[in-house]
Amino acid sequence: MRLICKVDMMSFKVIILSYLNSKLIYAIVLILLIQMTLPGCGRYSAVSEQQPAVSPAINEQPLAVSPDAVNNAVPYFDSNKAFDLLEAQCVLGTRHPGGPGHVAAKEFFSGYFRQLGLSCQRQDFIHRDKHTGEVLELSNFIVQIEGRDSQLDPLFFCAHWDTRPRADRESDPRLTSVPIPGANDGASGVAVLLELARVLKGHPPLHPVYIVLFDGEDYGLTSDEYFLGSRHFAANLPAPCFAAGILLDMVGDKQLQFPIEGFSAARQPELVEAVWGRAQALGLSEFVNSTGPYIYDDHIPLLDAGIPAINIIDFDYPYWHTLRDLPEECSAQSLNVTGRLLLDLAVNGL
Ligand SMILES: [Zn+2]
């Protein structure tokens, strides 16, 4: 309605001006028109609540400010960068132990942290496959970021970087031995942590923070060959004690929802309350206040080693352990959810 009034007034001005020849009349009419227009400014600004009075180009100007400039004031988790990192891992190929993408990924992570100027400890270890006897060369990656208060116990954030060597949830038996791409189950948590490392390099966290990427989480044909990296890490801890550990797994699903993982709720209720509470304070509605399934994951060896650790996981993912676990089933918006939460916990503390 208001926008139509604006057009009518403009048309009226044009018609009047085109029929005026006398400079005097022109001046008088001009004054009258200005007077008519001035009270209209209020109406036009009211219109602008619905229809921006400025051109779209001017409106978009704030977006032209580089994220790094914004970062000087407020840490900014760049979910598009995180998604690029998810895709970059998938481009390397499947990252199951012994596969070509596994070797390439080690180089990728080392190079990434080197480029950021963060020192990265590569924790190498060997595992002999219990069924085939194959000797696997596995590596955890441990990055330490200084905290503003070095007296506080460190936080650590972790995810597994390896991918499952077999798509055993495929219905077609000819496909069950094919390695999965692992966009969500593998690359998603790592992508969030890689981007988080970049942001924290420029904005020191309150606690010292360890970022840990585990190898060999999803290798097992049988239950005793899962969690190889987190077991090795728990037996060779880089710090005597941690304030808290948060595991990310399958955090990239487009249809994202995080109920409270069962073991986390049972064994670390206070940490769960703090983390889910912070998520709700940040308006992250994907964190649901109900208990979900109990999931054996990398947090179990950590809990067994006495580390207060919880698992943030969306296990309701139809492409889990299938060949459809692809980047197109994930989204930058989903990565942003855990990215924002972990960044807030790191910068403001638990
Ligand atoms: Zn898996």
Image (cartoon, rainbow, N blue to C red):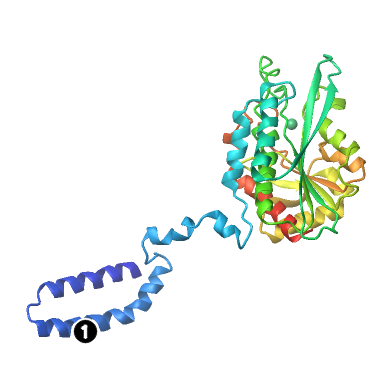
Between residue 102 and residue 290, name the one nearer to us: 102
Question: Which residue was labeled with disc 1?
Answer: 31
Is residue 256 something one can see in this rendering?
A: no
- Quarter in which the C terminus is drawn: bottom right
Element at label 1: helix
Is residue 342 something one can see in this rendering?
A: yes
Res 89 → quadrant? top right
- Residue sitting at the far left: 21
Q: Horizontal and vertical percent for residue 309? A: 84, 46
Question: What kind of residue is marked 1?
Answer: Ile
Q: Horizontal and vertical percent for residue 328? A: 57, 35
Res 16 → quadrant? bottom left
- Quarter in which the N terminus is drawn: bottom left
At x 43% / y 68%, what residue is drawn? 49
- Image quarter for ligand 1 equals top right
Q: Horizontal and vertical percent for residue 173? A: 69, 15
At x 70% / y 23%, what residue is drawn? 167
